[in-house]
Amino acid sequence: MAWGIDVKREFVERHLRLGRGLTPVAAALCGVAVAMPAAAQDADGKSEAAKEKRPTVSRAAAPSPNATINLINLLVKQNVLSEEQADALIKQAEDEAYVARQALRDASKKADGAEKTAAAAAEAVSPPGTKRVTYVPEVVKKQIREEIKQEVMAKAKTEGWAAPGALPEWVSRIRLSGDIRARFEGDFFPNGNDPFGAVNYNAINTGSPWNVNDLNQFYWPSYDTYQDRTRVRLLARLGLDTDLFDGFTAGLHIATGDSNSPVSFNQTLGGSGGNFSKYALWLDRAFIKYRPWEDAALNVGRFENPFFMPTDLVFDKDLRFDGFAIQFKNEIYPGITPFLNAGAFPVFNTDFNATLTAYDTVDVIGKFPSRDKWMLGAQFGGIFKVDSDIDLTLGVAYFDFTNVQGQLSSPCLANMTGDTCDTDTLRPSFAQKGNTYMMLRDIVADDPTDPTEAQYQYFGLASAFRNVMLNGRLDLAHFNPIHIILDGEYVQNVAWDRQQVAARARANQLASSATYPFPDNEYFGGNEGWMGRLTVGHKELKELWDWNVSVAYKWLESDAVIDAFTDSDFGLGGTNLKGYIIGASLALGPKVWASARWMSANEVAGAPYAVDVLQVDLNAKF
């Protein structure tokens, strides 16, 4: 009997544990005395449970549909529980079940009311057509959060409130750059130079015409060829470049300079009036560039030289180009990249109101014809990766200059400095020295009987210019970071005509640098030039004590190129020069370096001329 009671107790503990309300039942079934809670009383003193019909528990009770009642009846029959104990247990369970049912009904009513209230509030604030989603998956929530975050941050950056004190987005598209150079320069002339052979045609053509009458007692303007000079010079440049949209960029750069010379930004300290006077700034570059892709560009405005030029044999490194240019390159095979550069560049534009005041011995008021000067250029070449340590770049170029050659004018009166003739606009608006010149004016004497009558003359280039150019660079990096670089260029003026130029030179009543001895003016000029240079050291001076050294030799005949555009330092600028250049550079920091050059030049032909130039520079860039 005891074993049976234990089993029944275990059965009750496992199957009748229906919550805290049934815990006493389980305890009673296990034979533990428990305190039964008093039944709820109403105002009449009758229990609330008594008002409901409850199941009857007795030994003779019929089977019930409630499994719990049947179990209790079974326990009563087995004398495990008395009928009073069973009634008490069932009464307690029913009371607590009633309380639970009431709580569940109240919670359901409150939940329905809250849902209706939330739905009404959502409808009130949602615009017409809004669809409500009862359930949003977590992955969709995350995606929505990211999209909102990106949209808000983009707006914040644009309007500048993403971070306190942050600059607007457009400021990040602007890049400032520049460089400053302080230079000591010494110009030293050996004995034996002709003091009058280097005629300064630029001074004449940009000022008053020169009286070529044999009775003129004054010497023509000339370049210094025998008085040594030392100068301290400054170069400063500041540039602003900005990204616009879809491959468009623009740039604006300004720079110093003694004058509007196209080939020098040097400002001599103490020059331009002296007494600590302020110095001028010039427009260096102003351009719009379009890059449809990385290796193609269209330039419009005033911009850097768009051609591959390893040396300054033809064009000074400071020369800027006006006009239009395209640049294109494309790797067609691993290690082989052809390139094409081409453009049209206005060299001189005739004054819109160029006036003719004297013509064929009769005073006539009229306008000059337009003789605008242009340079058309094209270059084709290739970049070859011969080996991992060997780079080779080769190019061939052609430059055609229109309306740069002088022409003899129609017969005209020119006995006063203010007189003009119809080819005056063909004189160069800027020149250095070395080219051969001719007289432009066919002057008719106002009084043929007066041998002292002035004959005011301007001068133009005796040769036409169409340059064919070959250039190349070989970069050997076997000892990287030390490089061995070989640069070379060759140029020929294929429009040059020796007989025509010689005849024009002999007719010139002033000496030319390639004619000697004066006054016979025999012409010794030429139309070829070449330069070779070897550089050893770091390709770029980036870190402290980076260095390189170089040695070069140059040969440039009188009419090989237009002297206005070639190097302004070697031989103090121009053509008809030959000689060597030695240079060295040393980095003093990431953006600061010192350099020195010694340039020794002599004339190729004509009047004796030699000059040695020393330049010691301190450079900084940012």
Image (cartoon, helix red, strand yellow):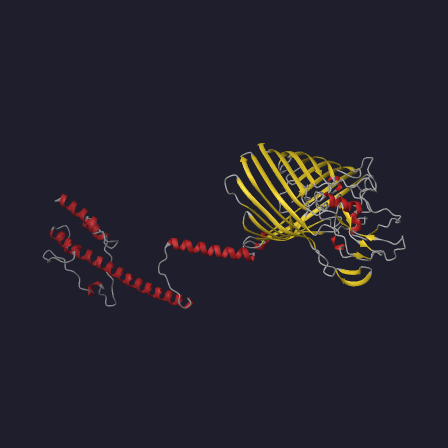
Left or right of 320? Residue 34 is: left
| In this view, 461 is above or below 541 | below
* Residue 480 in view of the camera: no
Asked whether residue 422 is in view, the answer is yes
Quarter holding the C terminus? top right
The front one of 49 and 161 is 161
Q: How many marks?
A: 0
Q: x and y percent of residue 248 in the render?
A: 57, 54
Q: Relative to the observer, which residue lies in front, 343 or 230?
A: 343
If the image is split into quadrants, where does the N terminus sit? top left
Name the one closer to the observer, 149 or 104: 149
Question: Would residue 16 be found to the left or right of residue 379 on screen?
Answer: left
At which x and y percent is residue 345?
65, 52
- Figure quadrant of residue 61: bottom left
Q: Residue at x 72, y 50 (%)?
A: 405
Farthest residue to the top: give it: 479
- Residue 229 point in image, percent of width and height: 80, 40
Q: Please, which residue is most extreme toward the left here? A: 60
